[in-house]
Amino acid sequence: PPAAPPSAAAPAAGKGPQHLKYPGKHEGLVVLGEKPLVAETPESLLDDDTTPIDKFYIRNNGQIPEEAKNPDAWKITIDGEVNNKIEITLGELKSKYKAVTRRMVLECGGNGRAGFSPPARGNQWGNGGAGCAEWTGVPLADLLKKAGLKPSAKYTAHYAADLHLSGDPSKPSISRGVRLEKAMDPNTMIVWAMNGQPLPNIHGGPVRLVVPGWSGSASQKWLTRITIRDREHDGPGMTEFSYRTPIKPMVPGGKADPANFRILESMPVRSIITNPANGAKFAAGTKELKLRGASWAGDLTVKQVDVSLDFGASWQRTTLEKPKNKYDWQRWTATVKLLTDGYFEIWARATDSKGAMQPHQAGFWNPQGYGGNAMHRIAVLVG
């Protein structure tokens, strides 16, 4: 049976966000959906270099499985277009393969969806469907090499232990995959630890995939099987408009043609302001504000982050840190001068290593709202 559903604190007088009530999770997380459970992290809670587990966003597609009683006995199968089918327990995976730890961003494919107009279908994420944790596990490539890929191998198909919302055990709640080139990236990992702790059940424990830089839906939680296919995978979450963006730009709100869509792969460049928080108030006479934030760019890196206090009329370059490793986010800092008291908006804009810059508003509308990466804006009051 599925675990008992968490409760969301009722908003006062039917207004305001619903805050998460879930064991081990920060009560500042905002519930976007209850069936399945989805909760985002306000930008101001993403101020740590490494996102703590309690502040990490939650995205489910099915029912949350019960916690594994004996994690090391959990079995993973690799089959399909391979020479040698592999069945391995988590305990064997830990003992037979060399573990690595990398700090990498995991981001929901729908992050930024709330910025689309007209509204797109799905959970209305702001920027909080992302976090950057330290993941410990083994590169998926190590197991695929052991299995021996056939020349026909082209794509992965991921399967998991979470039950479909309908309760039908024959239906996967979601089953996505990636091109073989991405599966063989040494940063694509089967992981069992998060920030040095056993991977929590709510985050896919005891074992999950992490496919960094691409939509988080490819990073299957509660991983049980990876089937190698000779064609693009067509499981739930892979067809029609699911995790796809238009090839030719479409009229916002117009009728979409599935033939005009391609799979969302590398996520777009994004920056967030993590300090101060939106709505912060400062004493009269405050002459400068110290800003902090984070930025990332899917498979790419961030070249620069700029901030504006005058609605984009002028921009100031921030100090951008280097990533700890590939797919780590890049923290940034800046000090901005204030000439007067009053109301200010702070805008942040990142530019990726190929020169693509965040837009003022979410563009290239699509029915399920992918790729929305509008600049982050916060308001502060001085005096």
Image: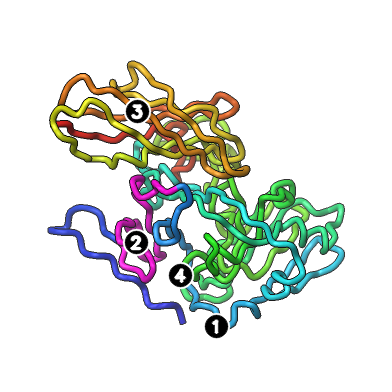
Residue 342 to residue 110: above or below: above
Left or right: residue 253 versus residue 216 is left
Q: Which residue position holds label 3?
A: 335
Measured Cα–Cα span from mark 2 to mark 4: 25 Å
Q: Earlier in the sequence, mark 2 or mark 3?
A: 2
Q: Position of residue 74 (x, y in %)?
A: 64, 77
Q: Is residue 308 above or below residue 229?
A: above
- The amino acid type of the residue labelled 4 equals Leu
Question: Relative to the observer, which residue lies in front, 290 or 278?
Answer: 290
Mark 3 residue type: Thr
In reply to whether residue 40 is colored magenta, the answer given is yes
Bounds of the magenta span? 20-48
Quadrant assignment, res 273? top left
Mark 2 → mark 1, Cα distance in angstroms: 25 Å
User: What distance separates the C-alpha of mark 2 from that of mark 3?
Assistant: 29 Å
Label 4 near label 1: C-beta < 8 Å? no
Q: Which one is closest to the eye, mark 3 or mark 1? A: 3
The answer to whether marks 2 and 4 mark residues whose Cβ atoms lie closer than 8 Å is no
Residue carrying label 1: 69
Sequence order check, earlier mark of 3 and 4: 4
Secondary structure at badge 4 equals loop
